Image (cartoon, rainbow, N blue to C red):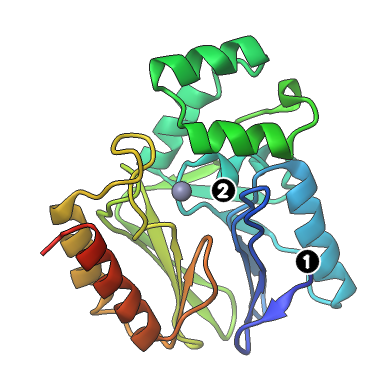
Amino acid sequence: MSLRKISEHVHILPHDTERDRPNLGYIAGEDYSVLIDTGNSPAHLIEMLDEIEQNGLPTPKLALITHWHWDHTFAMHAFNGLTVAHRQTNEILKEISEWEWTYEAMDERLASGEECEFCDTHIRKEYDDTRTIQVEMADIEFEDGLRLNLGEVHLNVIRLTNPHSDDGVVAHVEEDKVLFAGDADTGDYYKLDGGYDKRQFHDYIGKISLIDFDTYIHGHLEPMSPREIKEEWDRIEKEEALH
Ligand SMILES: [Zn+2]
């Protein structure tokens, strides 16, 4: 994968469905740069950092985590800068940091429903040896939201109720009008087998519609225009009968 330029200050490393690697974001300011999510493994993070270096861009100092899911967080321990997450994300990461990663322990979590099947399958694909997995909490946690001044560009981090996970923030690159949404408008694979909570879905799209963006970046889809994401929400609403 190669780094793709989205706007003046924003690049992404495009997602890879084969190993369930999400889009990773990179925002370069005059003073410092920030990653959006660290990736699903140290190998994924290294691919991103190599691309940043090869493009002559500054090394990111901070990594903002959109939500706790493995594909966004399992490289946190391998990131050299500071990691930042919402308090609830950190609480969940704390629990998961105690999980064991032998195939036996993974089978047990699958059987008990603690792990989702889609995640388990892709974790086994991404890691040759799952016992090397390390989960850690973020260095910095926040409660309501966060505004970062990277120099000439600002990142607004907003906690939003969403149908995908109990935690979850979106990150708005103000000057570039780019919105990183994590996987927020996808269903919940842990509790509802990919299904939707109707109230959370409408709450989410209602709040997102108030944000001024030209590009919407979902974790596992191509970047979309406001018109395209609205069409996507209409499709979800129909398919999932969320009227
Ligand atoms: Zn997710």
Q: What is the quadrant of the N terminus in the image?
A: bottom right
Residue at the (74%, 50%) spot, across then down: 44
Name the image quarter holding the C terminus. bottom left
**Residue 136 can be seen in this image:** no
Return the residue found at the far front.
239
Q: Is 70 positioned to the left or the right of 128 in the image?
A: left
Residue 238 in view in this figure: yes
Q: Is residue 194 left or right of residue 14?
A: left
Rate crowding at label 1 as few (under 14), some (14 to 19) or many (20 or more) other CA atoms within 10 Å. few
Q: Helix or strand or loop: what does disc 2 sit on?
A: helix
Which residue is depicted at the point 46% across and 23% down?
A: 95
The residue furthest left is 243
- Number of marks: 2
78 displayed left or right of 22: right
Report the front residue among 35 and 203.
203
Distance (Cα) linking label 1 and label 2: 17 Å
- x%, y% of residue 9? 63, 83
User: What is the x, y in percent for residue 87?
Assistant: 38, 41
* For the residues bearing labels 1 and 2, Cβ distance under 8 angstroms: no
Q: Nearer the viewer, residue 200 or 94?
A: 200
Residue flagged by tag 2: what amino acid is it? His
Residue type at mark 1 is Met
Disc 1 element = loop
Image quadrant of residue 112? top left
Q: Is residue 178 above or below residue 82?
A: below
Q: Residues within 10 Å of mark 2 (few under 14, many from 20)?
A: many
Q: Earlier in the sequence, mark 1 or mark 2?
A: 1
Residue indicated by mark 2: 72
The answer to whether the beta carbon of the residue marked 2 is less than 8 Å from any atom of ligand 1 is yes
- Check disc 1 and report the residue beneath it: 1
